[in-house]
Image: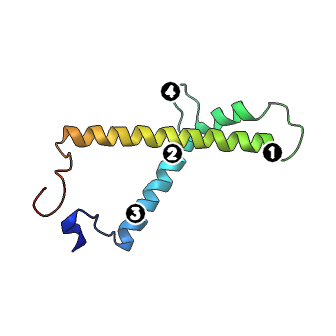
Amino acid sequence: MSFLFGAKPQLSSAEKIANAETEVEMVSDMFNRPSLTSRSLQQSCTAKCIPPEYREGDLNKGESVCLDRCVSKFFEVNMKVSEKMQGEAAMRQGGTGGGGGIFGM
């Protein structure tokens, strides 16, 4: 009954699995999808962080840290843009929240 007082209802196992599958699809799509400059996340971060001539078979620490930061920044910006777009869509639909609770206060 906690949903009556503004708390979010608990998701079922099937809903959690569906959400996880959607998230995996979104992440893999972002990783492979060309951006506005027709370069994927993989291509952009690789070009920025890894020199074209390889000196070692594995990534060195600097390359690894650079790739980690590049991908992290991309996802951070993507989350901010998604939240902004969702907020604007909710405002357009008139779903400003209404305050919650059973009396809409």
Q: Residue at x 24, y 43 (%)?
A: 90
Of callouts 2 and 3, which one flags the residue occurring earlier in the amino acid sequence? Answer: 3
Considering the numbered disc 2 on the image, is that residue within a helix, a strand or a loop? helix
Of callouts 1 and 3, which one flags the residue occurring earlier in the amino acid sequence? Answer: 3
- What is the C-alpha distance between the residues marked 2 and 1? 27 Å
Residue carrying label 3: 18
- What is the C-alpha distance between the residues marked 1 and 4? 30 Å
Q: Contact (CB < 8 A) between labels 1 and 4? A: no
Residue 29 has which mark? 2
- Could you tell whether 51 is left or right of 99 in the image? right
Q: Quadrant of residue 4?
A: bottom left
Residue carrying label 1: 61
Residue 93 coordinates in the image, percent (x, y): 18, 42
Of callouts 3 and 4, which one flags the residue occurring earlier in the amino acid sequence? Answer: 3
Q: Amino acid at mark 2?
A: Asp
- Could you tell whether 54 is left or right of 23 in the image? right
Frontmost residue, 68 versus 56: 68
Residue 37 coordinates in the image, percent (x, y): 54, 25
Of callouts 1 and 4, which one flags the residue occurring earlier in the amino acid sequence? Answer: 4
The label nearer to you, 2 versus 1, is 1
Q: Residue placed farthest to the top in the image?
A: 37
Q: Quadrant of residue 1?
A: bottom left
Residue 84 coordinates in the image, percent (x, y): 36, 38
Name above or below for residue 66 compared with residue 58: above
- What is the C-alpha distance between the residues marked 2 and 3? 16 Å
How crowded pointer 2 is (Cα within 10 Å; few <14, some 14-19, many 20+) is rated as few
Considering the numbered disc 1 on the image, is that residue within a helix, a strand or a loop? helix
How crowded pointer 3 is (Cα within 10 Å; few <14, some 14-19, many 20+) is rated as few
Residue carrying label 4: 36
